[in-house]
Image (cartoon, rainbow, N blue to C red):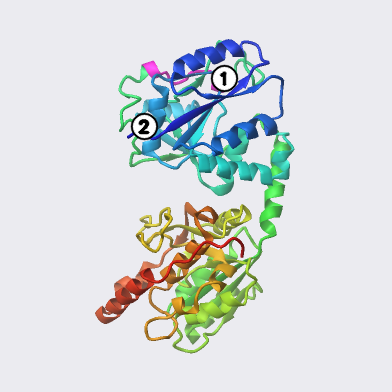
Amino acid sequence: MYPRVVIGIMHAAFAEGRRESLKRLLAQIGAPIPYISASMRPEPVFVYGRRMWRWASEQDADLVGVLNDDVRVCPDFVETLSSMCKAVPGEVIGLSATGVEACLYAKAGHNWVRSYNLTGQGYAAPPKVFAEMLSFWESSAFFRSGRHNADDTVGSQWLYDVQKPAWLSLPAIVQHDTAVASSVGHADHPHRASLVSWEDLPRLDLTAPKAWRVKDVVYHVPWLENPWFPTALLDEWRRERRALVAKTHVTITSTNRGDPAGAARCIRSVREQRHAHFTHLFVALGEDVEEAARRAAAGDERVVVQGPSSPDAPTLANLLPLWRRLPPGEVVVWLDGDDQLATGRALEAVVRHHEQGKWVTYGQFLWGDGAVGFASQAGSAPREEPWCATHLRSFRAGLVQRMRDEDFREAGGGYAGFVADQRVMIGVLELAGQGRSAFVPQVLCLYNHENSFELHGAPAEKKREFDELVRVRSMPRYSPLGEL
């Protein structure tokens, strides 16, 4: 069963040669008949682009393709999109990768390249992604002004903002129709050249189910500034985003028992963050850990090192009092005290999602040997699904505050030391609902596996952990909240 694909075309009816170009394009696409968003006169991108995205966000389809009217498309275009959707479901796909690097990768036999740059000739995404991009567009005073030059500019900035690059198809299955007058100012615009010809790639069956399989090696192309996007405007947009992110205060909470070196690495990684508006509440379980933590904090007033509620208190007995005294809307980042943030922009990536209305985020991590962890997109019933919502974890404090106290306790009545992460994250995911939760696929956390319970737990403790896991999974499910 192929995924359902619908197509929308942005038609500049007022421009020379566009009616004829549209007719050619419709003949190439065939069925299903595309939606046509026609502009009878020049319109700002905030008008015509939003009109298309709103339509796309409302479609009952797996994938919505958006095209300009001055392009030509590959043979069996809709079937090819369906094949792509199967290869990378739920992702943004750029359909017109004609840059130099992309051409080189295509000629080398690769089918995909990762990039933050979309092109207006053609791109595709699930309806819910169009809804997220539209929300980003409408929440920005800068983009509402319409002073930028194209809808794909907004799409590229959104991808960069959420740090989720698109898949660019190789070869480009959408290319400028060079018989049509350029809409970007000059005929030698580099995107107007068909640098990779479909006819030159007979090895690729465009409609084969495995034609667009994701290979082991994926090339990551960095975000590049659009040369047709004035630098002054780009700087203005960046100032707006920095000001927005800077307003959000983050409370990071950590506990550490028995690993002074890990505590120091953890605190240093937090202090090195570009997002500087945070408080790090670090619970040191032991004098040696406390000493190392205070040295790493080096007098930084944003790092608060404190002792445990009692010497042998388990994880949640130390964390719950911290979480419960915060304002309900406070962003909490739960970072284990022997782990560390993977990059200097980890907090920034988390905050972006919260500024866009998310209440919960969970991200990818690296094991000690450099292997990527098991984090993945959670479904609609996290209590019944395989565990995936792990490091780096963040949530609004009000979610934990609305959870039942008994859910944090083990069968014996004390606060939990076992299965603490699932107790918390499953509950907050259920309370937030899928629409307010976000999986961040970028690696944000380095996991210290050497201290893990999996390696050092005694058989009796692992049996107790399993029993608690069964209890957590059988607890009553929460209903999503309307507000915090």
Residue 152, visible in the rendered structure: no
Question: In front here: 106 or 309?
Answer: 309
- Residue 11 versus residue 430 in the image, above or below: above
Where is mark 2, residue-wise?
Answer: 83
Which image quadrant: the C terminus? bottom right
Amino acid type of disc 2? Ser
Question: In front here: 443 or 137?
Answer: 137
- In the image, taking residue 325 as reference, residue 462 lies left or right, namely left
What is the CA distance from the residue labelled 1 to the residue labelled 2?
A: 23 Å
Residue 461, position as x, y percentages in the image = 30, 80
Q: Secondary structure at mark 2?
A: helix
Residue 271, visible in the rendered structure: yes
Asked if the residue under mark 2 is in contact with the one under mark 1, i.e. CB atoms within 8 Å, the reply is: no
Q: Secondary structure at mark 1?
A: loop
- Residue 311 versus residue 484 in the image, above or below: below
User: Which residue is at a point 60% across and 57% down the rendered structure image?
Assistant: 354
Residues shaded magenta: 190-199
- In the image, taking residue 300 as reference, residue 198 lies left or right, namely left
- Residue 106 versus residue 478 in the image, above or below: above
User: Which residue is at a point 65% across and 11% down the rendered structure image?
Assistant: 16
User: Which residue is at a point 37% across and 82% down the rendered structure image?
Assistant: 411
Of the image marks 1 and 2, the number of the one nearer the N terminus? 1
Give the numbered dot on residue 69: 1
Q: Let me know if residue 142 is in the magenta part.
A: no
Give the numbered dot on residue 137: none
Q: Let me know if residue 194 is in the magenta part.
A: yes
- Residue 102 versus residue 448 in the image, above or below: above
Residue 323, position as x, y percentages in the image = 57, 74
Amino acid type of disc 1? Asp
Residue 363, position as x, y percentages in the image = 47, 57
